[in-house]
Image (cartoon, rainbow, N blue to C red):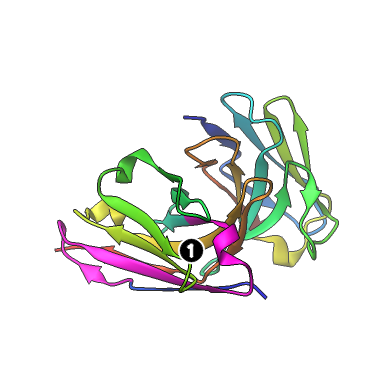
Amino acid sequence: EVQLVESGGDLVQPGGSLRLSCAASGFTFSDSWMTWLRQAPGKGLEWVANVKGDDSEKHYVDSVKGRFTISRDNAKNSLYLQMNSLRAEDTGMYYCIKYSGYAGLDNWGQGTLVTVTS
Amino acid sequence: DIQMTQSPSSLSASVGDRVTITCRASQDIKNDLGWYQQKPGKVPKRLIYVASSLESGVPSRFSGSRSGTEFTLTISSLQPEDFATYYCLQYYVYPLTFGGGTKVEIK
């Protein structure tokens, strides 16, 4: 059974940094594209970033380029999102998701909450 | 970026009603579209992938179709557990983009 467990969400001031983690199990992590996606309170879904299984290819939504970095450690079956220069508009639930180019967003974690406020 | 225009943004319907939600892509996305259901406080759940393939375990009253750049999610007979918000997602090209969502409420 695929399991994705996020952690690292917290309350942070604007301009601050945070690192989210996602522990994956139940599938061959190193073969899988992974996604970070977010949802602001009461709002819709927004894709944030994707990373290929071997870490050789990454994609970001424009609003986080230069501030966020998606990465992975295949030896630890873990996905990360380093978030710098945080803004109030980065507030939301962040989901770690197993992605496939054929079917899209396959399996979701429960999410971790990031709140950016002064 | 590909824009996904989803309509309506909300609707009220009764149990047993046939419900149709539409997403229009701003350019060709082939069949690379999925539909997701989200209940309040819950993680979104995939219903449909590649435009018309039903996710395992999802009731057959849900169906998806495509006509060009217009995609439709149909619920043939709305059930109490179907009251939720529905989103379409295109994954044909980066950035992946969602429709704005459709909130299905009880009439």
The residue that appears at 79% across and 62% down in the rendered structure is: B56
At label 1, counting other C-alpha atoms closer than 10 Å, the crowd grade (few under 14, some 14-19, many 20 or more) is: many
Image position of B89 with respect to B54: above or below: above
The x and y percentages for residue A91 are 31, 59
Image quarter (top left, top right, bottom left or bottom right) of the C terminus of chain A: bottom left
Whether residue B69 is visible here, answered yes or no, is: yes
Question: At label 1, which amino acid type do we have?
Answer: Cys
Answer with left or right where residue A66 lies relative to residue B24. Answer: left
Magenta residue span: A9-35
Q: Does the magenta-highlighted stretch encompass residue A30? A: yes
Q: In this view, does A65 lie above or below A79?
A: above
Q: Which of A53 and B62 is in front in this view?
A: A53
x and y percentages locating residue B50 in the rendered image? 73, 43
Chain bearing mark 1: A
* Displayed quadrant of residue A3: bottom right
The residue at which mark 1 appears reads as: A96
